[in-house]
Image: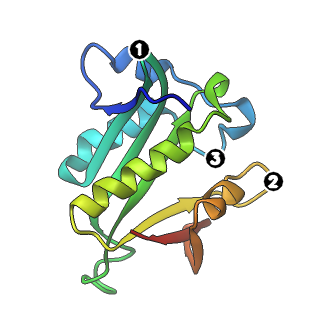
Amino acid sequence: MSTSLRLEPVTAATVDAAIALRVHPHQEDNVAPVAHSLAEAYVRGDTAWPRLIFDGDELVGFLMAFLDITWGEEEVDPTDVRSGLWRLNIAADAQGRGYGRFAVEAVRDELRRRGVPKMYVTWEPGENGPAVFYERLGFRTTGELAGHQIVGVLDV
């Protein structure tokens, strides 16, 4: 993994490259396309934190964190507020080089900076899902489901 890794906000100059980013075809059912994520970020305002992952001048991925959202149904427990990793798209030809780990660590560091004690993530179960990746990074399952996705948590 390169030492020139960094996160950058999505800008007018980078939005087309962000939208063009593609994961492996077998992963397309596991994560929404970047365009969908950017639309959600637009309507979610301050609770979405979208960032591009660059290695030098090369765009290698996209992540989006969620910040201080009420988890589940607000009327059930309005005090259950969580933050974590919402989306992670690593370009198909850039996978296996540590960019996903960098992305998770960058979100963890941002949450730590904001004083958030736990980082959440959800993932698609199944053969092509990212369970092994998240578990290797220290996430443990909570026993909850978000829709049909598994919920994981990591102490920040």
Q: Is residue 101 above or below residue 62?
A: below
Tell which tag, 3 or 1, sits nearer the viewer: 1
Question: The residue under label 2 is which amino acid type?
Answer: Glu
Q: Could you tell me which quadrant the N terminus lies in?
A: top right
In the image shown, does 51 or 115 lie closer to the viewer? 115
Question: The residue under label 1 is which amino acid type?
Answer: Asp
Q: Is residue 126 above or below residue 2?
A: below
Dot 3 or dot 1: first in sequence order is 3
Q: Residues within 10 Å of mark 3 (few under 14, many from 20)?
A: many
In the image shown, does 37 or 23 lie closer to the viewer? 23
Give the residue number, with chain letter if any, for mark 1: 57
Spot occupied by residue 103 in the image (x, y as percentages of width and height): 46, 44
- Residue 30: which numbered mark, if any? 3
Identify the secondary structure beneath mark 1.
loop
Query: Cα distance, mark 1 to mark 2?
Result: 33 Å
Give the residue number, with chain letter if any, for mark 2: 127
Tell which tag, 1 or 2, sits nearer the viewer: 1
In the image shown, does 132 or 148 lie closer to the viewer? 132
Query: Cα distance, mark 3 to mark 1?
Result: 27 Å
| Side of 72 relative to 144 (left or right) | left
Question: The residue under label 3 is which amino acid type?
Answer: Asn
Identify the secondary structure beneath mark 2.
loop
Dot 2 or dot 3: first in sequence order is 3
Q: Residues within 10 Å of mark 1 (few under 14, many from 20)?
A: few
Spot occupied by residue 49 in the image (x, y as percentages of width and height): 29, 46
Describe the colour scheme in one phrase: rainbow
| Side of 30 relative to 25 (left or right) | left
User: Residue at 63% of width from left, 47% of height from top?
Assistant: 30
